[in-house]
Image (spheres, rainbow, N blue to C red):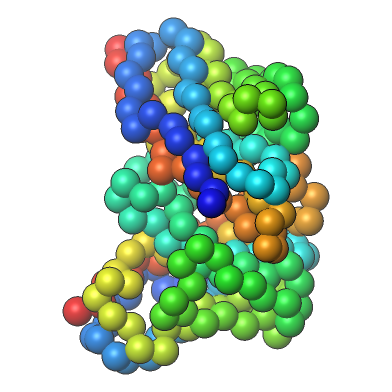
């Protein structure tokens, strides 16, 4: 089944404790992206990647890191999480043919206390 | 800068037709997409318009006018299961290849 897999689904952590949210896709998509979703603000893009070793900042990259060492994986790293990073996070992938849109992962609800 | 505007909420009755509008501002427009998101779920792709005109996919249609920086999603024969949030999104080539989402329109379908 074609899918984007994110882990974990839920995470509660403390301020300053480094964490990684994993994302993997099995569709051989070139384009992968991370979004955060907050009430009333829609989905805001954190980082995206157009291919292996190619990453670029979205609209809200501060406090986040990403890497794209393999085509299928695109982990999101919070080196020193803060409470304002409490949010619902989605990983998404697509082919470079934008006609088909994104496939989203199931989401990761992160709480930083 | 880049921005998208869509109504925050729309209410309609089962069986009716509803239109959700989206206006956008972006300098490197590369296409308008629509996504549906049910409570607790992930967004799912509905449609994409790169050129002016209407695209139809079953009960859903999407329209784009690039000269007006405007598009809409049309949902026909509304069903209760269509109650969800709907997001328009623009892919922008300026400074990269970002995809920017609107804040979403919450659709309530009443019996």
Residue situated in front as seen by the camera: B48 or B103: B103
Name which residue lies at 67% across and 80% down.
A68
Q: Position of residue A38 (x, y in %)?
A: 33, 56
Q: Residue furthest left?
A: A113
Image vertical order of residue A95 relative to residue B109, above or below:
below
> Which quadrant of the figure contains the N terminus of chain A?
bottom right
Occupied quadrant, residue B95: bottom right
Instruction: Report the residue at 45% width, 53% height from top.
Output: A43
Q: Tell me: B79 left or right of B89.
A: left
Residue A40 image point, x, y percent? 31, 46
Relative horizontal placement of residue A12, taking residue B85 as reference (left or right)? left
Q: Is residue A21 above or below residue A105?
A: below
Where does the image place residue B98, in percent across and percent down from the top left? 63, 58
Q: Residue at x 59, y 18 (%)?
A: B59
- The C terminus of chain A lies in which quarter of the figure? bottom left
Image point (44%, 26%), residue name? B82
Between B45 and B50, the one lying in front of the other is B50
């Amino acid at each position: 089944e074609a899918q984007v897999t994110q882990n974990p689904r839920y995470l509660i952590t403390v301020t300053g404790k480094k964490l990684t949210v994993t994302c993997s896709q099995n569709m051989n998509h070139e384009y992968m992206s991370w979004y955060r979703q907050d009430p009333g603000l829609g989905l805001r893009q954190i980082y995206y990647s157009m291919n292996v070793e190619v990453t670029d900042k979205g609209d809200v990259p501060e406090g986040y890191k990403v890497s794209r060492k393999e085509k299928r994986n695109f982990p999101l790293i919070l080196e020193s999480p803060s409470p304002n990073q409490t949010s619902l996070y989605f990983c998404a992938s697509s082919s470079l043919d934008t006609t088909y849109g994104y496939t989203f992962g199931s989401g990761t609800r992160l709480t930083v206390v | 800068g880049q921005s998208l505007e869509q109504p925050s909420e729309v209410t309609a009755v089962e069986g009716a037709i509803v239109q959700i509008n989206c206006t956008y501002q972006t300098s490197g427009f590369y296409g308008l997409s629509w996504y549906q998101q049910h409570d607790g779920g992930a967004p799912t792709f509905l449609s994409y318009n790169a050129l002016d005109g209407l695209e139809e996919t079953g009960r859903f249609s999407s329209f784009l006018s690039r000269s007006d920086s405007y598009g809409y999603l049309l949902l026909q024969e509304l069903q209760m299961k269509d109650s969800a949030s709907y997001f328009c999104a623009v892919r922008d080539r300026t400074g990269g290849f970002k995809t920017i989402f609107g804040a979403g329109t919450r659709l309530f379908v009443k019996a």
